[in-house]
Structures are given as structure tokens and as C-alpha cells.
Image (spheres, rainbow, N blue to C red):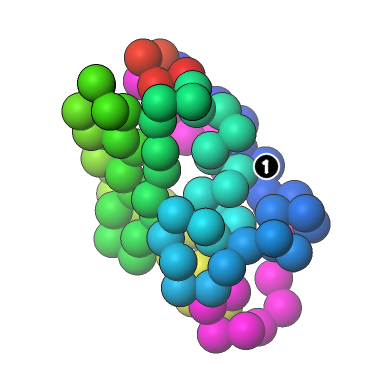
Amino acid sequence: MQCLIQITVEHIANGKPKLPRHCPVALAIQKYLNKDSLVCVGPFDLLIYGYSLGMQIQKTPKEIKEFMLLFDAGKKVEPFEFELDIDESYL
């Protein structure tokens, strides 16, 4: 299912640099997932894990990589949005 993921000022303020499960992108995606699913956003792969469902792995989109590099380096980043295909069993 295509989901419009919005990285907000709140996600940026609450995100933790260099922590793939707690970065602003992960926080924004996590709000779409059911309580048994987790997200981990890395520079190469974006992983959604469901305890009883296994894993959904996607290549990390270029716009997310660029955002993460800036955020992890302590640079100023702006809110943005992107579409992400998430298997409905994780929602």
C-alpha cells in the first residue's frame, strides 16, 4: 500500500542522529505501523520488521539518504514528504 510519509518539525526535533530506529524518518514511518512492527532506516536499506510477519526490505530512497546525512551531521534539515510502499500486513 502506498503511504504518504510526512517528516514534520516534531519528528526532526524528536529524532536521534545515527540511530536507525529513532531518526526522524523512522519516527514518521512508525506512526503508520501496527504495534507489532518496527522500522529501521539505514543508508542503504529501509527495513520493516513484524514479530510474526518477517521483514520487508527496500532500498533507501536517495532523498532519505541525503536527509539522513545532513541530519546525522547536525546540519539544518527541513520537513518533507515522500511515498513509501508498505505491505498492508505491517499497517
Q: Give the range drawn in magenta.
A: 71-87
| Picture quarter with the N terminus | top left
Vertical side of 8 occupied by 42: above or below = below
Residue lying furthest top in this view? 89
| Whether residue 42 can be seen here | yes
Question: What x and y, as percent, mark residue 78?
Answer: 74, 64
Which residue lies under the disc numbered 1?
Answer: 6
Amino acid type of disc 1?
A: Gln
Q: Where is residue 7 in the image (x, y as percent from the top left)?
A: 67, 49
Is 11 on the left-hand or right-hand side of 26? right
Residue at figure coordinates x 28%, y 28% from the top left: 51
Dot 1, how many residues are within 10 Å of its Cα: few (below 14), some (14-19), or many (20+)? some
**Residue farthest right in this picture:** 9
x 20%, y 28%: residue: 54
Horizontal placement of 53 versus 71: left or right?
left
Asked whether, in this view, residue 80 is left or right of residue 10, the answer is left
Q: Is residue 67 visible?
A: no
Between 12 and 44, the residue placed more toward the observer is 12
* Image x and y of residue 13, in percent: 74, 64
Question: Quarter of the image holding residue 36?
Answer: top left
Magenta span includes 84? yes
Task: Please tell me whether mark 1 sits on a helix, a strand or a loop.
Answer: strand
Residue furthest left in the image: 54
- The residue drawn where x is 79% and y is 57% is 9
Residue for point 69% across, 71% down: 77
Q: Which of 90 and 57 is in front in this view?
A: 90
- Residue 60's x, y, as percent? 36, 53
Q: Does the magenta stretch include residue 52?
A: no
Compared to 44, does 58 lie above or below? above
Q: In which quarter of the image is residue 18?
A: bottom left
